Image: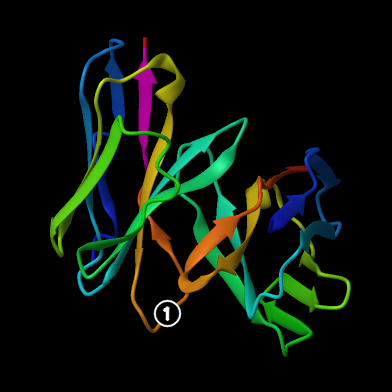
Amino acid sequence: DAGVIQSPRHEVTEMGQEVTLRCKPISGHDYLFWYRQTMMRGLELLIYFNNNVPIDDSGMPEDRFSAKMPNASFSTLKIQPSEPRDSAVYFCASTWAGQKIHTFGSGTRLTVV
Amino acid sequence: SQKIEQNSEALNIQEGKTATLTCNYTNYSPAYLQWYRQDPGRGPVFLLLIRENEKEKRKERLKVTFDTTLKQSLFHITASQPADSATYLCALPYSSASKIIFGSGTRLSIRP
């Protein structure tokens, strides 16, 4: 398995633009997590899905952020409109119900100018 | 609220020595605790999991202890090498068994 795949690796966008981050979890994993990492706040959980259904979105900062998981092999995190304070590294991770270990993707470094 | 604390300062160790990292938590009774390693530009990678009924766990040069009375875990790297230089994060389950939260991490540097 190629692991958790995220795209793009880097994204630079202007304030106000829409940004879409993508994630392909490991095949067979039924949990998918979106995290954001910054120097100030560390690694924060934004939202997670189980069997494609959002379970907990309490970490989503505000309505500008939305996440979807249309099927077991694909998820998106969208920011609209983007702001400079959204600049961070966004990670996707997956696991399965019988395991407690998260497998992370390589992340998307987002810069909003 | 639940809180996880790791050494905020970077740890600099001479090669060959034992590195010891600390993870403290409050308002929490986790069933297990995990340690991850993160290299620059990469996602965290799982290293070890220790359960509440285990006092110590080892994997090659790594050793983790878990003291539920002190609410503390220690992570040791023996015979440290420059390749061990990275940020190490501890993580605990939160509410549901599949949701975990991470400490802020400790940056470890091993000098030759």
Say if residue B86 shows up in the picture: yes
Q: Is residue B67 left or right of residue A96?
A: right
Decide whether residue A85 is among the magenta residues.
no
Subunit under mark 1: A
Q: Quadrant of residue B72?
A: bottom right
Q: Residue at x 60, y 36 (%)?
A: A41
Decide whether residue A108 is among the magenta residues.
yes
Say if residue A33 shows up in the picture: no
- Give the answer, above or below, for where A82 lies relative to A108: above
- Give the answer, above or below, for where B103 lies relative to A41: below
Q: Quadrant of residue A90?
A: top left
Q: Residue at x 71, y 69 (%)?
A: B28
- Main SS class of the magenta portion in the image: strand
Residue B29's x, y, as percent?
A: 71, 75
Q: Is residue A98 left or right of residue B60?
A: left
Residue B88's x, y, as percent?
A: 65, 52
Residue that label 1 marks = A99
Q: Residue furthest left?
A: A70
Q: Residue at x 26, y 20 (%)?
A: A81
Highlighted magenta segment, given as a residue range: A106-112
Amino acid carrying label 1: it is: Gln
Q: Residue at x 51, y 45 (%)?
A: A44
Q: Quadrant of the C terminus of chain A?
A: top left
> Mark 1: few, some, or many residues within 10 Å (few <14, many ≥20)?
few
